[in-house]
Amino acid sequence: MKTFISFVRKEFLHILRDKTTLLIMFAMPIVMIILFSYAISTEVKNISVAVLDFSKDEQTNRIIEKFNQNKYFQIKQYLTTNKEIEVAFKEKKINLVMVFSENFAENMLHTHEASIQLLADGSEANSGAMYIGYAQGVLGSYLKEINSDAGATQSFQIQTNSTMLYNPQSKSEYNFVPGVIGMMLLLLNAMMSSIAIVREKERGTMELLLASPMPPIQIILSKTIPYLTLSSITLLLVLVFAHFVVGVPINGSVGLLLLLCLLYIFTALSMGLLISTVMQTQISAMLVSGMVLMLPTIMLSGMVFPIESMPNILQWLSCIVPARWFISALRKIMIQGVDITAVSTEFLILIGMVVLYLIIALKKFKIRLQ
Amino acid sequence: MMIETENICKSYGKIQAVKSWSISVKANEIYGLIGPDGAGKTTLFRLLTTVLLPDSGKGVVAGYDIVKDFRQIRKEIGYMPGRFSLYEDLTVKENLQFFATVFSTTIEENMHLIKDIYSQLEKFSSRKAGKLSGGMKQKLALCCALIHSPKVLFLDEPTTGVDVVSRREFWQMLKRLKQEGITIIVSTPYMDEAEMCDSIALVNQGEFLRIDTPNGIVSSFDKTLFSVKSNKMHQLLNDLKQYSNALSAFSFGESIHLKVNSPTIKQDLSSYLSDKGHSELEIQEIKPNIEDCFMAMTSM
């Protein structure tokens, strides 16, 4: 145990004295999140709205008035036919079109339910989703108002039917942030740990370690701990940023969220160590972990393209991408707010991957020089 | 015997680095493995320190088989590889501490072994190992190899790239370590260091030339050796190689050493060289040293 602690201490010293590693570990994720959130927040204000009102009654007028008062929305145009919608998007720089169905107020009164269609320009997926989200917020507060006016006996509902034009598989920034976190944690940790063992080979210190009674499992495990610690700090920063600056909700338990992230970091680290035991030079280890891991993580994790819409073979392939399971579980916990039973599959698969990677790494770890 | 090998072989692809070597090292002696680069010294060290597997042949270190009982051997030996292999971003003290804990011991426990060496390093104890001078690096590496009080110490070219004064000091240290009961096997390309060893093995290009004590090797030289100088040194080596009585000729410092069968041909040699146009001739019969023996075995 004492040997193990001393080894971990040595690994910490290596990292803390290597300014480049520190910079990558901390600066890269934060810059990514800042850039990302900044890109979104610039688009939020002054949403140009066009209204297509087939009902033109007291209720729809009140809703339109609500939007007019809101500082984020500007009603720019009143449309009369469906055909004008496309023109409005293409030429008038309209961000959002609100379509009230016929007999809106009447439906509201009799069935307590009416529907509004929200159309957004989906070519800019993130901002489109954000406009819809904001509009839904305004509608929600309007509903609250009329519901409290009407007392507890009645409860009105407005069905919003939102569609992203030009990008029907609408993706929101809520969905994107888990993706970014998933990619970042994987690449960061896998790349950092992939050079850990190779570096000892390159420096020649591996020869000394091999000629010592140090067991391979200790050499491998002791390399994960410093990275696990540093990544956890990075992770906390990123989560705080995602929640308070970008505004991603954390609806599930924070404990479960952190547990999931720790497990995922460990998965990434063991993957990096596996690469490290096989490779001979730091450059090749970096290239393998960077290039080989980056593409599947971006393409097959569901971060950019929804897994459900992939061809079967790719869906099947995506199962071996750890990020897929992590992002899926992260979305469920952060956005849907589910408990552990709903994400047990993801947890079990990630645990299985860690065990598998570590066992292979241990098997591949050469107890002698080549 | 502390170390024994029997026809041990190792090749890398087509290159045979170690061709069927059998050596035996007695407990508590300084054993020198002498030979130029590429002789197979480092490979033998790696085989004996269990970081390489032999292709064939047997080896025993401290009573353990180098293939079967590698875990036991790794506890008993201290190894200083030829290339500086400590953590350059850690300080002197941190390196020492780390290697002490790797062998589950402490610096204090075996301070008596390294005191003489470490005292010279102490004033740099918070300096990073990468910032030390060559001689200091060697001393630190030796300290790290000694920190767990090994039975056998493997030193692979410990004095390569170290200045003459430090080299002499280094050998003094090895003599002291021998008195502590440690068996030392050391490799070096410097023939003059061979005389410091109790036994030596001369090796060249994977071949085993001879094992003996340094005196044994020198006294086994049954020919005559002349040291020759003239005013035309460049031409001299060629002329001597073509000399009919020459067994071998090689340059040695400022003169050329010529191996012949008997001292009586000195007169003949002198007239042969005069005919070739050499003047200011200096021909002296000398006592051979290890290098002469090595060169005589390998050249011409």
Image (tube, coloured by chain):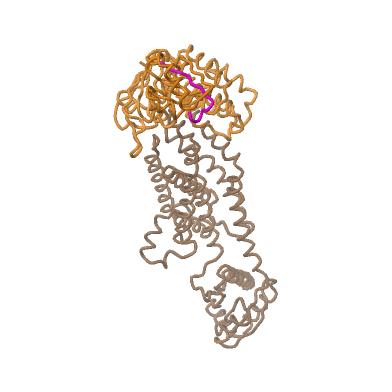
> Taking the image as drawn, is residue A242 in sight?
no
> Which of the two residues, B17 or B81, is positioned nearer the viewer here?
B17
Tell me the residue at 63%/30% (across/down): B127
Q: Is residue B225 magenta?
A: yes
Q: Is residue B58 magenta?
A: no
Give the drawing colour for chain A. Answer: brown
> Taking the image as drawn, is residue A6 in sight?
yes
- Magenta segment range? B224-235
Tell me the residue at 55%/87% (across/down): A83
Check the image and report above or below for B201 versus A106. Answer: above
Check the image and report above or below for A336 versus A141. Answer: above
Residue A277 spot, x, y in % from top left: 43, 42
Q: How many numbered circles are shown?
A: 0
Give the drawing colour for chain B. Answer: orange
> Which of the two residues, B162 or A46, is positioned nearer the viewer here?
B162
- Tell me: A326 left or right of B162: left
Residue A252 spot, x, y in % from top left: 53, 55
Tell me the residue at 47%/41% (across/down): A198
- Pick the quarter of the image with the C terminus of chain B: top left
Check the image and report above or below for B37 versus A264. Answer: above
Residue A352 spot, x, y in % from top left: 39, 47
> Which of the two residues, B265 or B246, is positioned nearer the viewer here?
B265
User: Could you say which quadrant of the image residue A243 lies in?
Assistant: bottom right
